[in-house]
Image (cartoon, rainbow, N blue to C red):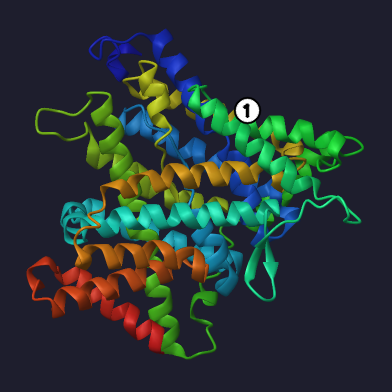
Amino acid sequence: MDKFFGIKAAKSSVRTEIIAGITTFFTMAYIIFVNPGMLSTTAGEEYFGPIFIATCLAAAVGTLMMGLYARIPFAQAPGMGLNAFFAFSVATVYGYRGALAAVLVSGLIFIIITLVGLREAIVKSLPHNLKIAISGGIGLFIAFVGLQNAGIVINDDSTLVNFVSFSTRQEAFPFAPLLAIIGLILIAILYYFKVKGSILIGIIACTIIGIPMGVTQLPESITTAHFTQNFADWADLSLLKLDFGALLADTTGFWSSVLTIVTVIISFTLVDMFDTIGTLVGTAKQANMLDEDGNVPNMKKAMMCDAVATTTGALMGTSTVTTYVESGAGISEGGRTGLTSVTTGILFILAIFLAPLAGIVPAAATAPALIIVGVLMMSSIKEIDFSEMSEAVPAFLTMVMMPLTYSIATGIGLGLISYTLIKLFTGKVKDLSILTVIVSILFVIKFIL
């Protein structure tokens, strides 16, 4: 084991690596509840259990690959933000199986990009401030979805949205929004005190508190039949049942369909790539794991693990798989080798047996997790240079248009178009890369067709 993972060379021990892997799992285990909650809004509530299984399997495969192939202590799972894009921007147009087909294609493109060494060129070609804005905008979008799922933000005919009323004069008191607010405050407090697994603790606590409030609905009984049915439904949802035909079935016309799906796949690929690179470099830097050239050890292998995990994740029935920043929790506990990831991956496999219980977790319990993740993703915008208008306006449009249009792709598109036009007419053409211009033109054509 030491020879394979290089534990002693990394100045670690088997015990430390296992503890680190357990820590990483409990820190990011919230995704096995949050991801099914989000994706089942499109696939159907009856598919919560099957998507729970798909989430666990995809996370296990990606994380085990990271441990056994790249041999670094990073974990993977369906990405927050990318699952929102999948559910609310892609699956609503192409259906769930059509969206899975788009994810599969983006994963294959990611594999090709990694194999031929285009990754660095693509990363350098897109504007730094826009990359940060994309992360911040997705954070806003996720938080908005969480507020809606909780019933805290409600529809309003005159102002589009409004705040839920807690007036005691109502016929039925809104316990679900109240439970979500309690969960949000609880998770924030746990985060402040740096409690490991604070989001997961918050979800479990809200689920329990929701029982006397009438928000959590307990089943009359749980039997092995529930478990086998979840697996049967999972097989029906995934297992090579992707719908590629749906990607070109847009009634607006063939070329419009092609351009739309191209922009969708580009969005999936780029966001996944930037998420992975940012997480790997940022987390490794904090743990002093970078080599003398400032690179992450086995970076190319790690990127390949991410790309293959996305491809297999699509076949299993879930959205894009990416590397999780929560891996830093295990690294902070001393995890330095692939054994940490292997431990986390095994725990994701064991978590599959919780599938019959997963369905009782109410939306009000997972909504606070979405809001907190949104807050964490928004923290990066402090790096944006708002003093430079040619950078500030595109970044602002990228962020604000995601929640306002309920579309991550639209936010990215408007950000790139405005960036290209402003740089062009302010004489800063040198700031524009060929890729930025090409993608901007594709988005313009998409919007006008």
Q: Quadrant of the N terminus?
A: top left
**x, y (%) of residue 85?**
49, 61
Q: Amino acid at mark 1?
A: Ile
Answer with left or right where residue 366 lies relative to residue 372.
Answer: right
Under tag 1, what secondary structure?
A: helix
Residue 300 sits in which quadrant?
Answer: top left
**x, y (%) of residue 363?**
70, 48
Answer with left or right where residue 225 lies relative to residue 394.
Answer: right
To which residue does mark 1 refer? 201
* Residue at horizontal 60 percent and vertical 51 percent from the top: 146
Residue 222 visible from this viewpoint: no
Q: Is residue 203 above or below residue 12?
A: below
Q: Quadrant of the C terminus?
A: bottom left
Q: Is residue 126 above or below residue 24?
A: below
* Residue at horizontal 70 percent and vertical 49 percent from the top: 48
* Mark 1 neighbour class, 10 Å CA radius: few under 14, some 14 to 19, many 20 or more: many
Q: In front: 87, or 314?
A: 87
Residue 17 visible from this viewpoint: yes
Q: Is residue 345 above or below residue 136?
A: above
